[in-house]
Amino acid sequence: MNQYVTGTVIKELREKHKMTQLQLAEKLDVSDKTVSKWETGKGYPDITLLEPIAKVFGVSVTELISGNTVHNANVSANMLRSKFYVCPICGNVIHSMGEAAIHCHGILLSPLEAEMTDENHMIFIERIEDEYYVRIDHSMTKEHYISFIAAASSDAIQMVKLYPEGNAEARFKICGVRRIYFFCNRDGLFSIDPVRGIDDKESGYDNSEERRELEKVADMLFCQENR
C-alpha cells in the first residue's frame, strides 16, 4: 500500500461531522489521546480500524485513504451526468453514472472534463434512418488516436471502443441521444450536441458553407485512405 490515511483527513472528517476527539474515540473503542496522536501525525490507526473509521464518517475505505470524498448528486441516474475515467497507464476506460473513487494501476483517477470540439477535433454526424453515423476527422496512429466514442441520452449510454489504425467512426441508435462524447489520448475528452453537429447545420455553425467544404475535403481524404 503506497498510501495511508493521514491525520489531516481524519481531523477534517471529524470536524465536518461536528464530532469531538472523545466522541470519535468512543465509537472506535480507542482513547481520545490515540485520536489526538493520529491527528498530529504522531501515529497512524491500525489497519483493522480503517473500515470502522470509514463507517463512522460514511465514506469508503478508498476515499478515506485517498483523502478525496465522493459526493454523488446523481441519485436519479441521469446518464447525461455521466463521468468518464481513463487510466494513463493502460488506457482502461471506466464509465460511471456519477462521481466515484476509482483506482487503476495504483493511480486515483479524476473524472474527465469535456471540452467543446475544435478545429483539431472535428466531428461529422450524419443521420441515417434511426441511427447517428459519427465520424471524427482525426489520425488513428499508435501514438495519437481516438480511444472511444459515446452517445448519451437521459436513460442510456452507448459506447464504442476504438483502436489505433482503425477508423474513428461509430453508429448509435438515436433513441433520444442528446450528447456525443469522444476521447483523444493526447488532448482529452470532447463533446457536442448532435443537433449542433447535424440537425441544425445552418444555425448550429458560425459558417455553414465553410463547414460543408470541410466535410467535402474530409470525404475525399477518407476515400483515398480506403482505396
Image (spheres, rainbow, N blue to C red):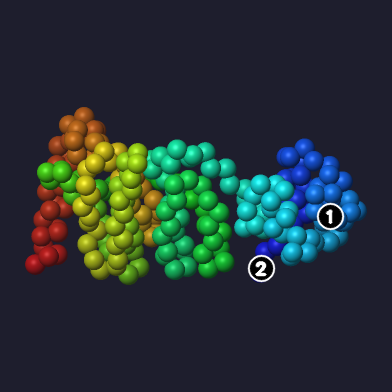
Image side of residue 81 versus residue 66, left or right: left
Q: CA distance from mark 2 to mark 1?
A: 27 Å
- The residue at 32%/57% (across/down) is 148
Q: Nearer the viewer, residue 32 or 42?
A: 32
Read off the residue under disc 1: 29
Q: Nearer the viewer, residue 186 or 79?
A: 79
Q: Secondary structure at mark 1?
A: loop
- The residue at 34%/60% (across/down) is 147
Image side of residue 170 versus residue 53, left or right: left
- Residue 209 visible here: yes
Which image quadrant for residue 193?
Answer: top left
Q: Secondary structure at mark 2?
A: loop
Amino acid residing under circle 1: Asp
Where does residue 168 sit, x and y in percent of width and height?
24, 58
Read off the residue under disc 2: 2
For residue 195, the mark is none
Q: How dense is the environment of label 1, judged by Cα within 10 Å: few (below 14), some, or many (20 and up)?
A: few
